[in-house]
Amino acid sequence: MRFGVLTGGGDCPGLNAVIRAVVRKGEKEYGYEFIGFRDGWKGPLEGLTMPLNIAATRGILPRGGTILGSSRTNPFKIENGVERIKENLAKMNIDALIAIGGEDTLGVATKLDALGVKVIGVPKTIDNDLNNTDYTFGFDTAVNIAVEAIDRLHTTAESHHRALIVEVMGRHAGWIALHSGLAGGASCILIPEVPFDIDKVCSYVKSRFEQSYAPILVVAEGALPKDGDLITKDSTKDAFGHVKLSGIGEWLANEIEKRTGAEARTSILGHIQRGGTPTAFDRVLATRFGLHAITAAHEGDWGKMVALHGTAIKRVPLASATEKLKTVDPALLAEAEVFFG
């Protein structure tokens, strides 16, 4: 058999580990051939490929990003997009696809599966918001990067007697904010699932200063005040309809200064969270996902996604990954509130 492999959406530590595992087991144990599609769904749409074999995947395990490249191309928003993909797969004698991605990439994979394209999905997102898997690779790396930043900011906050806001990724789900805030000893954590009261946030800031400490606040980019709107960079949207989020950290810093008189500064971690070397946890999880994905393909179990349930890798319906977002239970945030202020 001949497989096409692609990575779509935001880059993520661990993607190369998946590619390596798929190719190593597929070529070594099953004798399969692989073609790498470049830049997400743009690859099969436009016939953009690169060689993919054991030699091409040596040494990529510790590398962040993806050797295949990525994009947010949505073939269902392009005229004759699906037909072009099917034609290119037929021309290249590609029997099936292994799609590695998040909500948008796997959403396209699910639709293609329903249209007769053989697909196996591998879940990827630093946000950890894909349904029907306990964790996605990339999340652990993002949290560790955020925690390191918070640890460093504590000392400068204390030295300058400032409130420091750390803005992390998380459009609709606050997993990174919750985990990094808890691990980093944040004075307050704000997540999209629970609209926040700015007066209460300011009371945490005042309380922290009264105890002769400088507060660190961790806020997800999608967090919003109870009586406010989502803060966006502009009105433009990507191919999947997502607006560009930006500014909640700066807004929060301005409000804190106005309401408390304390100096406040914002650090926006942005793409730093999803760049660089994956943690050991993410390398292992991504590798296991890759091994199980090619096994599912070998057994012809199409339309499935590999998922982590407890410590076991299971196969679940591909459609289940995107039927809803896996968001933070407000009860988990409530557990952390004892450390606020």
Image (spheres, rainbow, N blue to C red):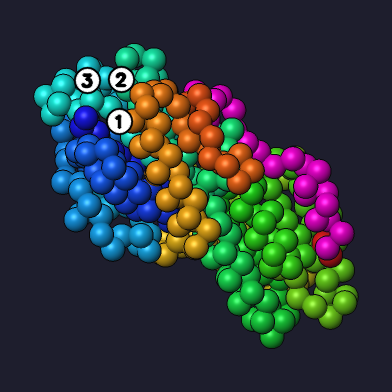
Q: Earlier in the sequence, mark 1 or mark 2?
A: 1
Residue furthest front in the image: 29
User: Residue 190 location, x and y as percent?
Assistant: 71, 52
Q: Is residue 270 above or below residue 334?
A: below
171 in relation to 337, above or below: above
Residue under numbered circle 1: 97
Estimate the spatial distance between the alpha carbons at disc 3 and disc 2, rounded to whole Å: 8 Å
Tell me whether the residue at label 1 lies in contact with that at label 2, contact meaning CB atoms closer than 8 angstroms.
yes
Secondary structure mostly seen in magenta is: helix
Q: Which residues are magenta?
A: 319-339
Q: Say which of 257 and 300 sits in front.
A: 300
Q: How far across and down, in percent of the image, does residue 56 sit?
A: 20, 54
Residue placed at 32% from the left, 22% from the top?
118
Is the Cβ of the residue at disc 3 closer than 8 Å to that at disc 2? yes
Going by the image, does 65 lie left or right of 86?
right
| Residue plotted at (29% across, 49% down) | 24
Q: Amino acid at mark 2?
A: Val
Residue type, label 1: Leu
Amino acid type of the residue tagged 3 in the rendering = Lys
Residue that extends furthest to the top in the rendered view of this protein = 115
Observer-nearest of 17 and 242: 17
Residue 313 relative to residue 25: left or right: right
Few, some or many C-alpha atoms within 10 Å of disc 2 (few <14, some 14-19, many ≥20)? Answer: many
Residue 265 is drawn in which quadrant? bottom right
In this view, 201 is above or below 163? above
At mark 2, the secondary structure is: loop
Eye-nearest disc, 3 or 2: 2
According to the picture, the residue beneath numbered tag 2 turns out to be: 117
Q: Which of the pair 189/175 is nearer the observer?
A: 175
Q: Secondary structure at mark 3?
A: helix
Residue at label 3?
A: 86
